[in-house]
């Protein structure tokens, strides 16, 4: 090895590669869209025949809520309820909101897995006798065993990495979309042949669905209160929205544009699949039949009531059950991804112990968090004993209260950060002085807040278990944060530096590192100062990372010739530098390859890397000590010494600072 | 008088260099500006003073820059002291009010020790360039050419030569081969 190059470290994190809006949509839809299979049945049982109207209304509401996530994502790349609420209401409220939300994430996986298990069990009840197997199938026992297997499967998949699992989500959503279209066409055909009935707009709340209201004489499930109560019992169709904020950091460039596309895809899919198909079920299947036969497998019921031959019904039912299995198990995956994302945000803030964010040595995923989430989900599956209604009753506390705080925080942010540039703003604003008063956001907040308050009274199980869980988790966060603070005070002088968790691979020969970069274009971006990265921003704004390897090179200056073999040799400022690099890459949604080279001559290494790695372009920030001309002079002098004899092409050196660029070609 | 005004540089900062042809050393270095100092110098400061005085002496009296002002500018230019491991020293500066390159090549077979880098200096190529947009790329090209020519073997060859014209011819022959 060249004596000026001592060692090469290549850093990677779970987020340095990015996904398309289709993949992002698929991840969210596997949760959000999956509620089509159970929301209608649970709602029908809870408050009566008017459920199709409310499920449809909740889907429209989802559209307005999805838009709120665009505005919050334009403010925070690593956003979500925890970050947004912390920004306006402080850490305590943020911990509270996130505790509530995690409760729902932990419920999403069990409710989806149990529902999938029930679809499978009811299907087996019909199919097995056909092949002369007369087992006495207990649907709830089957659903518990099935759910545990699914949680285990997706726990393993997520340990392997998001990108790998998101590809599965895309396939699932494509298949489910095909089934949805078939069901929709056949439903319209059935309506055409058999006619239909409008579902009655009346409420018949069960005792469980009335919750505490049963004992409050002045609170009656009529009028607006009745509507809000019914909406509250339909909110479980909203699960998965927060996942959108969690996957935003992984969406590729242009981020907001792709997020908007993802929102449109999610809304259309949710509206048609959950809203319209539940509505079709409501107008085709008699209400009594829904309650007595299909409440646990509504879309299977829709197949059996279609105006088509019986054998065709069985084939279609098989496909529907298969699609239910796929999307509902996909929801288990999304719940693990979501819980992982939220707990990561919390851990980044020093509220969870550092070892919780440790990366898997092979796959680079936060395996401790993923394992905790999967274990808790498995425990909830066992406790539910396969009762989807029980899980449905427990659901929505977290979703609603986290949405309430999220929307309220977004409203506050319009005043607190009124001058911050937003790539997208929630519509309906009135300009008063320098403020954009968010009338649209306020309206949607009032709706969600009203439903949240009503749900406290009606969803007894959700209120009790939600408050208990939130309180317990909040206490764990608080104790853990206190311990972390004490530990940091002892070991760290500067607690402002939040270290990015990275995976390190070491190359003894720098040429081995260059073999990893195989895209047709290459750019070398040397970095030094975390506050001087405008040149990296310039590259990320102007370069297509699909065809370009963007290698971010940091030269750790080591005097003498001792070998510096690990990342721990870096100072806090250097670790902060890499955190900034990763955050900027996330913001632009473009892949970068951070590399650390230990050397005693930074300019030499930059040029050596460019020559030996075939980089036709070097983009540098300006040196505050010497200035751009001095940098180019150094490069020119080194070039003369290092230029290979048979060098045919050229290396363009760009020095960029603020909005200026000085460019020179080394021939 | 040569004014020191760094701020004036910013006028032409937003530039992308036109790809000018490489400049040969022979174009900017006259043979009379090649000096062999067999006895060397006391230290690097002495060497620089000698080089500066030599270049200034080549100006006509009416246009002669003040040594003190150049020294002030050198103090503000850390890149002036560029010493390489192989014994090549390229003190360089961009100056206003000059319209062409000014240079001197000082050969010191008895090396001058640079205390900062601990390197021995055998060849000193002192270069003053006009501080204008057009000359900056040329300035870079010359710097690159100097290091390209004065590789280890050439430095070893030059310090063996006994007079300026031999050194000039040797450099020209190296340039032709490059």
Image (tube, rainbow, N blue to C red):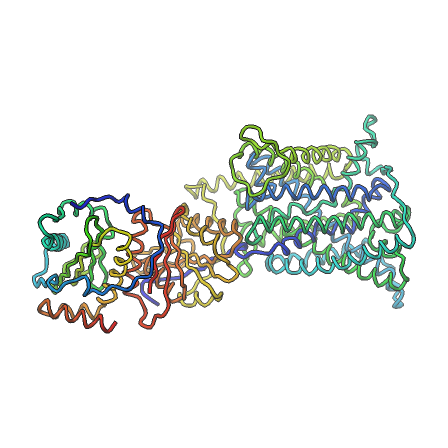
Q: Which residue is most to the left?
A: B39
Closer to the camera in the image, A38 or A385: A38
- Relative to residue A518, is residue A593 depicted above or below? above
Closer to the camera in the image, A318 or A441: A441
Which residue is drawn at the image coordinates 77% and 60% (left, top)?
A322
- Relative to residue A546, is residue A85 depicted above or below? above
Q: Is residue A528 visible?
A: no
| The image quarter in which residue A447 lies | top right
- Relative to residue A29, is residue B86 depicted above or below? below
Q: Is residue A306 visible?
A: yes
Q: Whole-percent x and y of residue A473?
A: 63, 40
Which residue is drawn at the image coordinates 77% and 35% (left, top)?
A228
Q: Is residue A79 left or right of residue A638?
A: right
Q: Is residue A422 left or right of residue A561?
A: right
Q: Whole-percent x and y of residue A119?
A: 81, 56
Quadrant of the rendering where the C terminus of chain A is positioned: bottom left
């Amino acid at each position: 090895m060249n004596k000026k190059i001592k060692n090469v470290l290549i850093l990677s994190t779970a987020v340095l590669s990015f996904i398309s809006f289709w993949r992002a949509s698929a991840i969210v839809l596997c949760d959000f869209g999956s509620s089509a299979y159970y929301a209608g049945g649970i709602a029908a049982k809870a408050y009566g025949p008017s459920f199709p109207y409310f499920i449809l209304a909740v889907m429209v509401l989802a559209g307005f809520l999805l838009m709120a996530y665009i505005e919050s994502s334009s403010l925070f790349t690593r956003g979500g309820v925890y970050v947004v609420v912390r920004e306006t209401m402080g850490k305590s409220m943020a911990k509270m909101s996130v505790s509530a939300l995690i409760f729902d994430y932990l419920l999403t996986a069990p409710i989806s897995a149990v529902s999938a298990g029930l679809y499978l069990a009811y299907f087996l009840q019909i199919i097995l006798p056909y092949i002369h197997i007369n087992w006495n199938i207990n649907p709830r026992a089957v659903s518990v065993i099935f759910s545990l297997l699914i949680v285990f499967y997706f726990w393993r998949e997520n340990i392997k990495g998001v990108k790998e699992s998101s590809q599965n989500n895309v396939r699932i959503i494509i298949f489910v979309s095909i089934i949805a279209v078939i069901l929709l066409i056949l439903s319209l055909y059935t309506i055409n042949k058999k006619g239909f009935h409008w579902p009655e707009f009346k409420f018949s709340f069960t005792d469980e669905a009335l919750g505490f209201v049963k004992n409050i004489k002045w609170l009656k499930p009529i009028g607006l209160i009745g509507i809000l109560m019914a909406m509250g019992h339909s909110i479980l169709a909203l699960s998965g929205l927060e996942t959108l904020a969690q996957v935003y950091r992984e969406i590729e460039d242009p981020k907001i544009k792709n997020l908007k596309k993802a929102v449109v895809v999610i809304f259309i899919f949710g509206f048609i699949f959950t809203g319209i198909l539940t509505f079709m079920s409501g107008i085709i299947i008699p209400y009594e039949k829904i309650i007595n036969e299909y409440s646990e497998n509504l879309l299977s019921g829709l197949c059996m009531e279609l105006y088509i031959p019986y054998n065709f019904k069985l084939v279609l039912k098989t496909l529907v059950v298969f699609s239910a299995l796929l999307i509902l198990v996909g929801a288990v995956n999304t719940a693990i991804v979501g819980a992982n994302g939220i707990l990561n945000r919390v851990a980044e803030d020093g509220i969870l112990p550092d070892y919780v964010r440790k990366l898997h040595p092979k796959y680079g995923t936060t395996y401790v968090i993923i394992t905790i989430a999967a274990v808790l989900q498995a425990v909830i599956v066992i406790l539910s004993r396969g009762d989807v209604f029980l899980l449905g009753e427990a659901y929505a506390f977290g979703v609603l209260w986290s949405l309430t705080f999220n929307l309220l925080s977004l409203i506050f942010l319009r005043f607190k950060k009124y001058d911050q540039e937003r790539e997208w703003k929630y519509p309906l604003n009135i300009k008063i002085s320098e403020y954009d008063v968010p009338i649209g956001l306020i309206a949607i907040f009032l709706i969600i807040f009203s439903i949240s308050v009503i749900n406290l009274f009606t969803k007894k199980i959700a209120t009790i278990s939600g408050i208990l869980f939130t309180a317990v988790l909040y206490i764990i966060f608080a104790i853990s944060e206190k311990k972390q603070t004490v530990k940091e005070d002892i070991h760290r002088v500067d607690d402002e530096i939040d270290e990015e968790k990275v995976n390190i691979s070491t190359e003894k020969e720098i040429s081995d590192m260059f073999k990893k970069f195989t895209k047709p274009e290459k750019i070398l971006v040397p970095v030094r100062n975390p506050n001087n990265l405008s040149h990296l921003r310039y590259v990320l704004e102007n370069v297509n990372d699909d065809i370009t390897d963007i290698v971010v090179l940091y030269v750790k200056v080591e005097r003498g010739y001792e070998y510096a073999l690990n990342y721990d040799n870096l100072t806090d400022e250097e670790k902060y530098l890499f955190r900034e690099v990763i955050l900027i890459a996330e913001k632009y949604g473009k892949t970068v390859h951070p590399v650390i080279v230990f050397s005693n001559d930074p300019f030499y290494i930059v040029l050596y890397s460019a020559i030996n790695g075939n980089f036709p372009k070097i983009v540098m920030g300006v040196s505050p000590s010497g200035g751009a001309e001095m940098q180019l002079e150094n490069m020119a002098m080194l070039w003369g010494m290092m230029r290979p004899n048979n060098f045919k092409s050229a290396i363009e050196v760009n020095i960029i600072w603020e909005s200026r660029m000085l460019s020179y070609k080394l021939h | 008088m040569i004014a020191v005004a760094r701020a004036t540089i910013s006028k032409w900062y937003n530039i992308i260099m036109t790809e000018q042809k490489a400049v040969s050393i022979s174009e900017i270095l006259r043979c009379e500006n090649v000096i062999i100092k067999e006895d060397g110098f006391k230290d690097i400061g002495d060497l620089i003073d000698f080089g500066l005085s030599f270049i200034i002496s080549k100006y006509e009296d009416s246009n002669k820059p003040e040594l003190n002002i150049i020294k002030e500018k050198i103090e503000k230019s850390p890149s002036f002291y560029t010493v390489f491991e192989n014994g090549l020293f390229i003190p360089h500066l961009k100056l206003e009010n000059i319209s062409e390159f000014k240079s001197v090549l000082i050969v010191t077979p008895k090396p001058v020790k640079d205390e900062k880098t601990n390197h021995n200096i055998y060849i000193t190529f002192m270069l003053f360039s006009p501080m204008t947009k057009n000359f900056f790329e040329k300035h870079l090209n010359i710097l690159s050419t100097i290091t390209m020519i004065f590789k280890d073997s050439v430095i070893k060859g030059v310090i063996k030569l006994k007079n300026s014209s031999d050194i000039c011819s040797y450099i020209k022959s190296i340039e032709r081969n490059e």
